[in-house]
Image: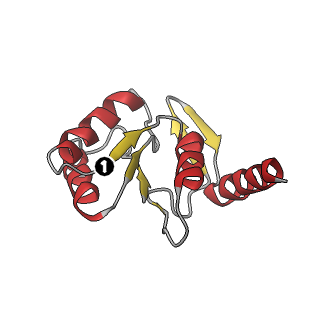
């Protein structure tokens, strides 16, 4: 399962290409937000969708990156691999003129702890 998005205010022509590649390779894709900057995150997602739709690949869209990660964690089956692509070492999301703290390592840990406490 691949969770990814494309940055805003960057080369728009790459978005459908990235969607196509994920649709061809991943068993399931969660398209989400990744530093939309001044662009509408949902418009970026629609650009990515153009490419993935052509592959027939399975996917969903969840604009909120934390919710997208939670969806992936909740829907993964045993032995599935979840690839969180795009953020890497970054510990922030750029939205409009704000830089917001967002460390995927912390997000994954918090969600796993939340899911574990709900199961106990």
Q: Quadrant of the N terminus?
A: bottom left
Which residue is drawn at the image coordinates 46% and 37% (left, top)?
Answer: 62
Q: Nearer the viewer, residue 20 or 92?
A: 20
Q: Position of residue 29 (x, y in %)?
A: 37, 52
Q: What is the x, y in percent for residue 15?
A: 25, 46
- Residue located 52% across and 62% down the image: 77
Left or right of 6 on screen, residue 89: right
**Residue for point 70% across, 51% down:** 111
- The foreground one among 97 and 54 is 54
Closest to the observer: 107 or 39? Answer: 107
Q: Is residue 61 left or right of residue 80?
A: left
Q: Is residue 20 above or below residue 12?
A: below
> Which residue is disc 1 drawn over?
58
24 on left or right of 113: left
Under tag 1, what secondary structure? loop
State the residue lying farthest toward the bottom. Answer: 79
């Amino acid at each position: 399962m691949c969770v990814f998005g494309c940055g805003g205010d960057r080369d728009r022509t790459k978005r459908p290409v990235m969607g196509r590649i994920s649709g061809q390779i991943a068993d399931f894709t969660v398209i989400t937000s990744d530093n939309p900057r001044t662009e509408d995150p949902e418009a970026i997602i629609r650009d990515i969708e153009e490419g993935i739709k052509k592959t027939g690949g399975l996917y969903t869209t969840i604009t909120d990156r934390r919710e997208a990660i939670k969806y992936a964690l909740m829907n993964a089956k045993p032995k599935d691999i979840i690839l969180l692509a795009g953020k890497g070492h970054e510990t922030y999301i750029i939205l409009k003129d704000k830089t917001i703290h967002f460390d995927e390592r912390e997000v994954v840990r918090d969600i796993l702890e939340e899911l574990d406490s709900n199961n106990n």
